[in-house]
């Protein structure tokens, strides 16, 4: 039996190629090896983003970026998977994209200099800003009535939310833990929070199952 990594994607289009603005002529000739679902094979990046924009969910995700946290890229990837409205980077403009696995090209990512600037931007749109941290008085994610229009704000791995971020949040919640560790990984926490929103509000019949819908 042959060994080695499984080839990703599809090869060149076989037969008469489709026409239309959504298709990328180069991909039709060379094949499409991108990490996208079957629905978007051979589509241009712009066409994919435009289609996603018609279905994005009403939650946002934000993360503070003071130390070039390696979790940011992974959070962006999860935000793309759960189809967040936007991802917000707070602090330094440059961030570690490695964990995003190119998904940042399909996800709207907005930068803010400070947590206060993030809060002002969200409140103008009627979006609640909720910090995620194991702080005294935090609500439990498991029993919290998650608002539909919400932004989940995460701090840096280790220190958690900055003091400025805590002061501008509309509230905080934590994820129940039962072991000896003080906290779970920030990217894991982000995925749990996003999926909690999905479980309450998303149309699960529209979820991908490995192929075209």
Image: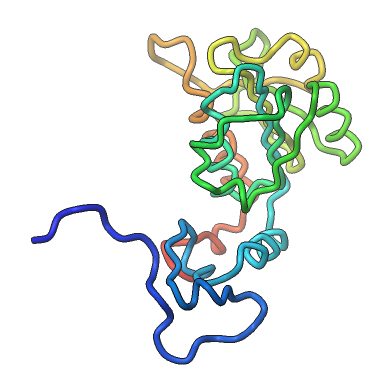
Quadrant for the N terminus, please: bottom left
Side of 100 where 124 appears, left or right: right
Q: Name the residue nearer the viewer: 86 or 18.
A: 18
Q: Residue at x 62, y 64 (%)?
A: 48
Tell which of 159 and 110 is nearer to you: 110
* Quadrant hosting residue 19: bottom right
Q: Is residue 22 left or right of 73 when viewed as pictured? A: right
User: x, y (%) of residue 71?
Assistant: 53, 28
For residue 48, above or below residue 92:
below
Specify the farthest residue to the bottom: 16
Say how many tags the image has.
Answer: 0
Image location (x, y in percent) of residue 72:
57, 31
Q: Kindly identify the residue that appears in the image at 60 percent across and 46 percent down.
A: 104
Q: What residue is at 73 percent from the left and 22 percent from the top? A: 91
In the drawing, does residue 38 fall left or right of residue 120? left
Q: Position of residue 74 (x, y in %)?
A: 51, 36
Which residue sits furthest left? 1
Q: Position of residue 35 (x, y in %)?
A: 46, 56
The colour mode here is: rainbow
Q: Is residue 81 above or below residue 185?
A: below
Q: Residue at x 54, y 43 (%)?
A: 77
């Amino acid at each position: 039996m042959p060994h080695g990594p499984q080839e990703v994607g599809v090869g060149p289009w076989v037969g008469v190629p489709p026409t239309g603005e959504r298709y990328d002529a180069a991909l039709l000739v060379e094949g499409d090896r991108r990490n996208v679902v079957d629905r978007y094979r051979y589509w241009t990046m712009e066409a994919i983003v435009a289609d996603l924009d018609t279905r994005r969910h009403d939650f946002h995700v934000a993360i503070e970026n003071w130390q070039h946290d390696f979790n940011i890229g992974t959070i962006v990837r999860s935000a793309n998977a759960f189809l967040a409205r936007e991802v917000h980077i707070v602090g330094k403009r440059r961030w570690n994209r490695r964990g995003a696995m190119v998904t940042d090209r399909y996800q709207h990512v907005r930068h803010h200099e400070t947590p206060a600037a993030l809060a002002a931007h969200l409140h103008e749109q009627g979006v609640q800003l909720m910090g995620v941290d194991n702080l005294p008085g935090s609500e439990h994610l498991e029993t919290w009535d998650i608002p539909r229009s919400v932004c989940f704000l995460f701090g840096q791995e280790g220190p958690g939310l900055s003091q400025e971020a805590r002061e501008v949040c509309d509230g905080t919640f934590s994820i129940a833990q039962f072991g000896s560790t003080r906290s779970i990984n920030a990217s894991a926490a982000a995925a749990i929070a996003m999926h909690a929103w999905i479980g309450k509000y998303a149309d699960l019949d529209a979820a991908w199952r490995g192929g075209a819908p």
